[in-house]
Amino acid sequence: MSGRLDDRAVSETLGFILTFSVVVASVGVVYTVGFGAVTDLQDAEQDANAERAIGALAESFGDVERGAAPAQAGEVRLGGSRLRLADGEEMTVSVGGGGAPYVHATTPGALVFSDEDVAVAYVSGMVVRTDRTEDGDVLGRSLVERPSFACRPEQATVSLVVLRAAGGAENPDVRTDGSVLVTGSAESRSLLYPATGTSPNASTVTIDAGAYADAMAPSMAESGWTRSGDEFTCSTERVYVTRTLLRVSFVS
């Protein structure tokens, strides 16, 4: 009798141990998979927040670019990410067929919202997203908001927006869990081409977009531009190239 009781006790103990082991293992799997999924969702939401924030600023700065407002401001919640004004990549605009060739090279500056693997930047009227590896290598760039570059057979327009720190200070750079108020004020608006008192007549206008070319390509093709390498060319009868200088400041 006691032997059967001992066997039953052993069986119940083994059963409890096996059941407990299965429960512990299941909890571990759920925690590991669930935690990873939650982290991925948080990262995706942070990236989407970056696109929305910089996209909203692009719309606000667009009013300044068009002369509809002398200045615009917007609040950006960083949530531990970084916001900075960077030098950005050089862009060059060339006009042909209007007499002497016209070339204007500029470094427009970039307002960049970034975390570990994604950066979203406002650059000369457009918004570009850059995805990176953990080592910082660029995986690819995509266009979130289009630039103000129009190509039609009768007329092409290229509107450049140049960002510089307000008051001649160093480029602002902040990382915080809170929010940052970003202000862009128009210091000047200029007609670069044609020169005062001259004709806008031309045959082509070409934009060398450099590192932004791949991101811009689909949008530029839809707008009538022809791509060759990093350059986009529009065949047209008249060209207007404008530049708006925005002074940017942060308040956190």
Image (cartoon, rainbow, N blue to C red):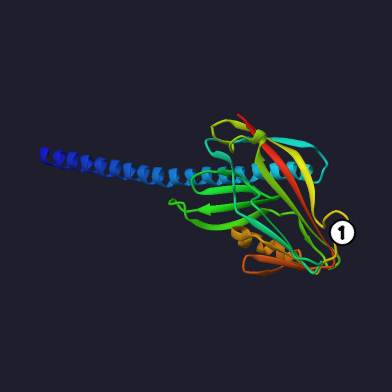
Which type of secondary structure does the marked residue at label 1 adopt?
Answer: loop
Left or right? Give the position of 74 relative to 46: right
Q: Is residue 67 above or below residue 97?
A: above
Quadrant of image for the C terminus = top right
Q: In which quarter of the image is residue 213?
A: bottom right
Q: How crowded is mark 1: few (under 14 residues within 10 Å), some or many (20 or more)?
A: few
The number of numbered badges drawn on the structure is: 1
Q: Nearer the viewer, residue 218 or 195?
A: 195
Q: Quadrant of residue 6?
A: top left
Left or right? Give the position of 235 relative to 77: right
Quadrant of image for the N terminus = top left
Q: In which quarter of the image is residue 4?
A: top left
Q: Position of residue 80 (x, y in %)?
A: 52, 35
Left or right? Give the position of 205 relative to 47: right
Q: Where is residue 27 in the image (x, y as percent from the top left)?
A: 37, 42
Q: Nearer the viewer, residue 150 or 243?
A: 243
Q: Position of residue 110 (x, y in %)?
A: 62, 47
- Residue 75 visible to the viewer: no
Q: Is residue 230 above or below residue 252?
A: below
- Residue 152 visible to the viewer: yes
Q: Where is residue 56 in the image (x, y as percent from the top left)?
A: 70, 42
Residue for point 62% across, 32% down: 180
Left or right? Give the position of 151 relative to 134: right
Residue for point 69% across, 47% down: 162
Q: Nearer the viewer, residue 48 or 127?
A: 127
Q: Mark 1 points at which residue?
A: 198
